[in-house]
Image (tube, rainbow, N blue to C red):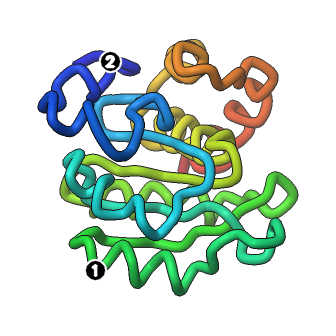
Amino acid sequence: MPLGEPLVGRLPNSIKAGGLNPMDFKQISENYAAKGQVLQQEMSEIAGLGFKLIINNRPDGEEMGQPEDAELKAAAEAAGLSYVFIPITLPTLSPELVTQHHAAMEAAGGPVFAFCRSGTRSTILWALTQVCFHGKSIAEVTSAAAREGYDLSGMAPLLEGYREALAG
């Protein structure tokens, strides 16, 4: 399946009809979706969509009232999902965090559902893993992100810099 082709098109009608609105998340690639804040009650629905791993890229306490990492982890695990907490902000982004994100994706054993406040940081991390570890072009990943509403066109220097930093 090409980058950006929606998983939603392959979902049973019963899943599409109720619960988590498929339009609430963006299917960036065959095995990676991004979304804004996920709530505990959505974990079962995410598992029902076939995702295997939740990656939380949102730091605790970023916004008043957001669920804490521990609460989300417990809900994910109760739903049968693996869960990884890799909080980032653009100032804290580092080659180590990109490598952690990549390792989590590789170990997932199936589709990954990542989230942050809006889905943008999770999409940036996906783009970085694709460019740095899978040899994808910057044009290819920014185009896939753009098809889902994430404008990464200004991130080309960052993507290229990380490709060079992690190339060895």
Front residue of 119 and 16: 16
47 lies left or right of 70: left
Q: Residue furthest right?
A: 91
**Crowding near the residue tagged with mark 2, few <14, some 14–19, many ≥20 C-alpha atoms within 10 Å:** some
Front residue of 42 and 151: 42
Rendered location of residue 49, percent (x, y): 23, 45
- Above-or-below relation of 62 to 9: below
Residue at left offset 26%, top offset 32% = 17
Residue at left offset 16%, top offset 25% = 10
Q: Amino acid at mark 2?
A: Glu
Rendered location of residue 71, percent (x, y): 52, 83
- Above-or-below relation of 76 to 47: below
**Crowding near the residue tagged with mark 1, few <14, some 14–19, many ≥20 C-alpha atoms within 10 Å:** few
2 lies left or right of 93: left
Q: Are marks 2 and 1 in contact (CB under 8 Å)?
A: no
Q: Which element carries disc 2, helix, strand or loop?
A: loop
- Above-or-below relation of 70 to 135: below
Residue at left offset 46%, top offset 25% = 136
The picture quadrant where one finds residue 149 is: top right
Q: Which element carries disc 1, helix, strand or loop?
A: helix
The residue identified by callout 2 is 5
Front residue of 51 and 136: 51
156 lies left or right of 7: right
Question: Marks 2 and 1, how far apart in space?
Answer: 29 Å
The residue identified by callout 1 is 78
- Above-or-below relation of 84 to 49: below
Rendered location of residue 21, percent (x, y): 41, 36
Front residue of 38 and 159: 38
Where the N terminus falls, by quadrant? top left
The picture quadrant where one finds residue 84 is: bottom left
The picture quadrant where one finds residue 2 is: top left
